[in-house]
Image: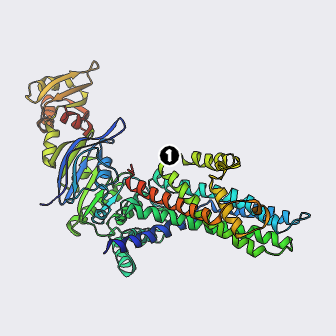
Amino acid sequence: MTVIVEATNVSKWYGKVIGLNNFSLKVEGGITGIVGPNGAGKSTLFKILTGNIKANVGDLTVLGQSPWRNPAQLAQIGFCPDYDFLPGEITGREYLRYVGGLHGMSGDKLKARTEEVLELVAMSKDADRNMGGYSKGMKQRLKIAGAMLHDPQMLLLDEPLTGTDPVVRKEIIDLIKDLHAVHGHDVIVSSHVLHEIERMTHRVALIYKGRAVATGDISEIRQLMSNHPHHILVEGNGLIPLAQRLLTMDFTVSVELRPDRRSMVVMVGRSDPFFDSFPGLVKETGSDIARMESMDDDLESVFKYLVG
Amino acid sequence: MMDLERNLLGLMTVFKFEARKLLLHKRWMFVVVLAILVGAVMGYSATRQGADIGTASDMLNLLVLTFLLPVMALIYGASMVRNEMDDRSIIQVVTSPLDRRTSYIAYYLALTVVLVILLIIITLVGGLSFMAFNGASGGPELMLAFMAVLCIGAIAYSSLFLVIGLVMKQPLYLGLFYVFVWEYFIGSVPGAVGELTIRHQLQVIASGLTDKGSFVNISGDPTTSLLAMLVMAVILVVVGAFLFREKEIA
């Protein structure tokens, strides 16, 4: 498959703040998810990919060319930022005509394409309303429409699901999948929530503190998550026999029973075998479990584990 | 599509969008108030004893040419690109395949044209108000002369304040310094130093178009001043366009 983005040892800093730190990544066509917590460097990466900022060091090619000071290349890229920049005083249709003009489109071609993308993002009905009155989901859909209006080869979608409700989120996820499957766009989409990305693609890159800490198939990433030590809080009654039984299991690293004997923290080396065998152990020891939660089953702790 | 064609279409798109935005911005209420004030002051001065076309010339010089022109150019120009960078709405322009230098020229043209339109309206309101209360002849010619000078003034001031807005995070401070310190204080210094202001050069140009009022006392070659203003504007627009291309939009 064609490589659409190749970054080698790219660093970008703003004064004393590092945006990207010796960042290396190779992205092939299709849908690729960029996952990382807030401040990890996702937006900095998109700004560099669109040529809005320049890397201080390192090599970067987007669709085979350097993006800095290369406006002609933006004809092949559609960008949807994570923030709201839509002018509230014009209608959605007027906005798309404006975007089309910026991309050198005009006349019947622009008109037809405007209707086509409005239909695609399910915004035809509301296209003649001022954007100031749009909901968050409508704005996101229109931003995506603006990014794809000129039919670019590659779409960069920065946190397109942020602030949307579950219904809109599902619609946008379906739309993003269609953008590749039906319309053939290569899509790079970022999020700080892994399972959102998981619903769109199996190829992900994890970014943390300006570095790409893991790339590959999402099942490999899941394996990494599964293999890193977990702390699991268990609350209920009759926990002592359960704690004793857990200590005999090879996946258990330690069990810390709290003074009230009504809760304990279990540290396991691998979480999957623990979760698989836990119901059987509860039944066997006759414990009464009220609540159980993983204390570090979030991306932040995975990233911390991955970067040591 | 050829780059030239795409850039021309893009230039027109940015120009129309920005001009509309400036004209429809809620600042239009401020412009209406200014026009009414200029009309009221000009109307009142027309009724004073001894008022003639020279009085109208001096009032337009004082109110519009030396005050409203730089102040409005500052308010509209310094905030134009700066506000879009601050609220990040500029992203649409800088992620399009339009050459950034072309975009900058489109911003400049929109700013200049809008300023010219607004200043012409204010001049018309002031001039017609004066003529309504005073029978002095030469009013239309005087207004035309002022409109011509205001066009050149808009060309010059727009180029200055647009580039200040591009390079500075708080452009109003430097703009206010230029308008109220440099133009008023330094411009009052006798000799060559006092001539190093846009205001003085515009008055020299005005003196070549009308001999009414205190313009008769202005010395200097109008053609040289006109060339100086145009050359300055071209240099500032070229520098601004280059800086915009090099600017990182974070």
Q: Is residue A134 left or right of residue A30?
A: right
User: Among all residues in the image, which is located at the extreme bottom?
Assistant: A108
Q: Is residue B161 left or right of residue B55?
A: left
Q: Where residue A50 sits: x, y (%)?
A: 31, 56
The residue that appears at 22% across and 51% down in the rendered structure is A60
Residue that badge 1 annotates: B169
The residue that appears at 71% across and 67% down in the rendered structure is B123
* Vertical relation: A153 (above or below) A233: below
Front in this rendered view, residue A53 or A47: A53
Q: Where residue A37 sits: x, y (%)?
A: 30, 42
Position of the N terminus of chain A, as image quadrant, is bottom left
Q: Is residue A143 left or right of residue B28?
A: left
Is disc 1 surrounded by few (<14), some (14 to 19) or many (20+) residues within 10 Å? some
| Residue B179 at least partly seen | yes
The answer for which chain carries disc 1 is: B
Q: Amino acid at mark 1?
A: Lys
Front in this rendered view, residue A179 or B189: B189
Front in this rendered view, residue A234 or B151: B151
Position of the C terminus of chain A, as image quadrant, is top left
Please, what secondary structure does the residue beneath circle 1 have?
A: loop
Q: Where residue B135 sits: x, y (%)?
A: 86, 74
| Residue A126 at least partly seen | no
Front in this rendered view, residue A52 or A133: A52
Q: Is residue A89 left or right of residue A136?
A: right
Q: Where residue B93 sits: x, y (%)?
A: 41, 61
